[in-house]
Image (cartoon, rainbow, N blue to C red):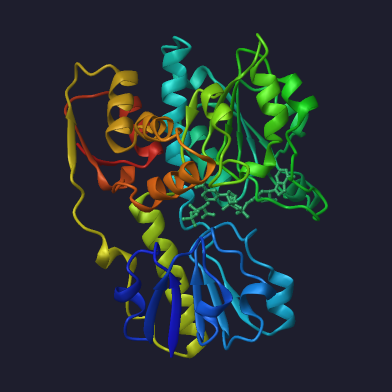
Amino acid sequence: MLIVADENIPLLDSFFGDIGEVRRVSGRSMAAGEVRDADILLVRSVTRVNRELLEGSRVRFVGTTTIGTDHVDLDWLEQKDIRFAAAPGCNANSVAEYVLSVLSLYAEKRGLADWSQLSVGIVGVGNVGGELARKLERLDFDVRLCDPPRADLGDEGQEFVSLEEAMKCDVVTLHTPLTRESGHPTFHMIGEPELDCLGANQLLINAGRGEVIDSSALLARLGQGDAPTVVLDVWEQEPRIHPELVDHVWLATPHIAGYSLEGKVQGTEMIYQALSQFLGLPVRKKAGQFLPEPALSKISFTSSAVEEDAIRIALRACYDPRRDDIRLRNAMSGSVEERGATFDRLRRDYPVRRECSSLKIQLKGTSKSLQDSFRAIGFKLKI
Ligand SMILES: NC(=O)c1ccc[n+]([C@@H]2O[C@H](COP(=O)([O-])OP(=O)(O)OC[C@H]3O[C@@H](n4cnc5c(N)ncnc54)[C@H](O)[C@@H]3O)[C@@H](O)[C@H]2O)c1
Ligand SMILES: O=C(O)[C@H](O)[C@H](O)COP(=O)(O)O
């Protein structure tokens, strides 16, 4: 059995090596000729999976080791009776931690001693937005949830607000899929009118898909004196992103919010499970057995630790978005093609990043409130 796979999927041999022959190809430039004799196709988000790629091939199963599925023509796969699997939720915690680190930097930029003074509007409350909401609510933030598809379903016990209401919060963070034809399409959902509602004391984060924001409208808004602060992890036209937009946003990262090692390996594991089920094979491998010891495994705080400082130190020890921001900014010279190749290279060669759960926090005589905050973020405590 031939498995053609994006070379950037981690642990291909460990998970799939005994199921079939694994052939690695570039996900970005994958072409029909490379998949014609494949039985199984494994992709990430940069491969367009459609008739053009698969017509005439032997492929019976397509797996994407990602949450997003907007790169896949699901209708066509169904018509052709090709089984499809994605990895819902695999890197949701990684994205939630990305947003928490951004919030800690933003609170500092605003001179707030207590970050939970910020109100946060979460737009798209699925695996990612839901995980973020749980953490923020436990940390005592004022959180408002906007999810019209879920509101339409009359989700019991959950209160949803309109996009307009969510956009009144100090922070607005986008976690919707990219959709064009649903009842609530998200393509350019944030355009000129929405951007005009945001003011200089607000932060807009996009860690969903670039096309959810109209980037021409955003660029125009960022040129005005009362523009909001903006953090972009995702961009229109990746990998050929707009360098002027990079210049104008506060933090710019190359679509890596979900790139914790745990998030990536869980994506591979979920597709391994789906493929095993499809082929009627036993599931014998688990992501946990392949995760190495983290480079940093413990941080200690004593009773003299100031709560806000301790949280900042621990969060940023795990992940500091400013490192990714600098790398992307330094890569914005050269031709459009060179910049695109560099964007992809930053993602391919992404340094190992571990989630907060990999770091033990040792607390000696610290307050109950600090312990609760660390637990809410996802750290393991040693008291
Ligand atoms: N930056 C990254 O690295 C990264 C990582 C993971 C996922 N993502 C993106 O984030 C998206 C969300 O991930 P998820 O796991 O939470 O998906 P999910 O499917 O679990 O949740 C998405 C939620 O968005 C809601 N939604 C749909 N249309 C909406 C609209 N118009 N307004 C408000 N809400 C709307 C849905 O009802 C759903 O509850 C993915 O589709 C993917 O594109 C990005
Ligand atoms: O949809 C997802 O899971 C994320 O956007 C994911 O992190 C994308 O990563 P890529 O497939 O582009 O490597």
Up-down relation of residue 106 to residue 275 (above or below): above
Q: Residue at x 32, y 68 (%)?
A: 11
| Farthest-out residue, front | 335
In terms of depth relative to the viewer, which is nearer, 78 or 117? 78
Residue 348 appears left or right of 227:
left
Residue 114 in view (yes/no): no
Q: Residue 152 location in percent, x, y?
A: 81, 49
Q: Residue 114 location in percent, x, y?
A: 43, 16
Up-down relation of residue 117 to residue 292 (above or below): above
Residue 108 appears left or right of 62:
left
Residue 198 appears left or right of 134:
right
In terms of depth relative to the viewer, which is nearer, 47 or 335? 335
Q: Residue 27 location in percent, x, y?
A: 48, 64
Q: Residue at x 46, y 36 (%)?
A: 334
Q: Quadrant of residue 160?
A: top right
In terms of depth relative to the viewer, which is nearer, 59 or 193? 59
Which of the image's four quarters has the C terminus? Answer: top left
Q: Quadrant of residue 310?
A: top left
Q: Residue at x 41, y 67 (%)?
A: 268
Q: Residue 23 location in percent, x, y?
A: 39, 78
Q: Residue at x 58, y 35 (%)?
A: 242
Which of the image's four quarters has the N terminus? Answer: bottom left
Residue 288 in view (yes/no): yes
